[in-house]
Amino acid sequence: MGNYYQPEIETASREEILAIQNEKIVKQVKHVYENVKYYRDLMDAKGVKPEDIKGVDDIKKLPFLTKADLREAYPYGLLGTDLKNCVRIQSTSGTTGKRVVAFYTQHDIDLWEECCARAIVAAGGTNEDVCQVCYGYGLFTGGPGLNGGSHKVGCLTLPMSSGNTDRQIQFMMDLNATILCCTPSYAAYIGETLAEKGYKPSDNKLKAGIFGAEPWTEEMRHNIEESLGIKAYDIYGLTETSGPGVSFECSEQTGMHINEDHFYAEIIDPETGEVLPEGSKGELVFTSLDKEAFPLLRYRTRDICVLTREKCACGRTHVKMSKPMGRSDDMMIIRGVNVFPSQIETVLLNEGYTPNYQIIVDRVNNSDTIDINVEISPDQFSDIVGENQAKERKLESAMRTMLGIGPKVHLVAPKSIVRSEGKAVRVIDKRKLHD
Ligand code: DLL
């Protein structure tokens, strides 16, 4: 049996959960219809009125929301309450066009932090723990979300943010951190660095890690568990739904329980939008049930996974999602940052290059690398090596500004990137991200 942060709701019967969801969805749809013109227009266009939604079974009548809607409604178009009621924003990386800005009232932050607290307690966390949070702090939801959850549980929180591995290790050792929260690739890197410094896994006091924000395999879990001497738990979420903690793993480590009292999950066919029966693999769609400031209904995550309601030995009754098995769009997650090929294309066009490029993503020593081969036109070619290098550095800096991570740019000779007869192969991802 597991440990629970909110046992009544985490182990409620299916009937109780359904009753809560049915009650909340009616209110939430009414709230959205009255306050979010953008979504009201979508509902009107589909001929759906708030009165048509009497429970979660009726959610399938509602229109979908996609990232394109978020872009169109940027920045305030999906706001569900007056700005004066909002206390925070968080955002994804990327530039204006692709940026998602999520708004929170204090109520929304409390619910979000409670979801993260459930994840920490499921991983064995109590007020006796020292929780080292090395997800990024700032606009990214990882740091603030887990930081808030850790406070709610009463752990001593180390708000480290990401990077500066030597300092991470010093704090971890000197302050006896027991729970580590970061991306799985950073956890693996910390494990490696500890070994390089001559530490054995038993030298640290860590017992658990809460890792997410990017895909990781069972093999990676095994390596991290071995190198740090811990149990490694998965955590999932996205900025659009508040951040980490939409779902989290329990002691069984066989999928992530979705916090169903706050999020209603559906699996759809990404091509047709049809809702698929339980156990089918498809695109995950979330409807927030009680958000005030950014209440997205039927938001298409583009993450492909499977849901199951099989009884879980941990005692939790909430539906479980598999690890995401891929995406139904071309988004890549590189060092925890969401990157779209179109962003790279925009930089190339802005800087006067042709959109003939290839992105090569790999994972070397548990850290993602991104190389971009950019074809130059004959008139851009220079025999002076230094000139080409200067152009490469200039492109790298423009890419860093756009993407939030620094790729390596290589200018290549005209016509040297193989032309494809079908869809251009823009991305070669050599990482093994899914089992
Ligand atoms: O990555 C929120 C988060 C922070 C989750 C910390 C977990 C821990 P975004 O930057 O908006 O939000 O990216 C969301 O990341 O649609 C998935 O494709 C991917 N993702 C998030 N968690 C996982 C995971 C945060 N555990 C996008 N496994 C999502 C695989 C994940 N992919």
Image (spheres, grey):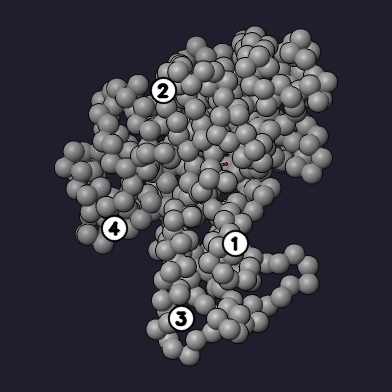
**Which percent across, then down, holds residue 65?**
68, 33
Q: Cβ–Cβ below 8 Å for labels 4 and 1?
A: no
Tell me which amino acid carries mark 3. Asn
Residue beneath disc 1? 345
Residue beneath disc 4? 193
Evaluate whether residue 375 shows in this view: yes
Q: Residue furthest left?
A: 174
Q: Residue at x 64, y 21 (%)?
A: 36
Q: How many residues crowd around disc 4 within 10 Å: few (fewer than 14), some, or many (20 or more)?
A: some
Badge 2 marks a residue whose secondary structure is strand
Indicate the quadrant where residue 42 lies: top right
Q: How many residues crowd around disc 3 within 10 Å: few (fewer than 14), some, or many (20 or more)?
A: some
User: Mark 2 and mark 3: span between their CA atoms?
Assistant: 47 Å
**Which percent across, then down, holds residue 375?**
59, 76
Q: Earlier in the sequence, mark 2 or mark 3?
A: 2
**Which percent across, then down, holds residue 250?**
48, 31
Tell me which amino acid carries mark 2. Val
Q: Cβ–Cβ below 8 Å for labels 3 and 1?
A: no
4 vs 2, front mark: 2
Judged left or right of residue 104, residue 254 is right
Q: Residue at x 58, y 36 (%)?
A: 74
Q: Is residue 307 above or below residue 293?
A: below
Badge 3 marks a residue whose secondary structure is helix
4 vs 1, front mark: 1
Residue beneath disc 3? 388
Q: Cβ–Cβ below 8 Å for labels 3 and 4?
A: no
Q: Is residue 432 above or below residue 168?
A: below
Residue beneath disc 2? 87
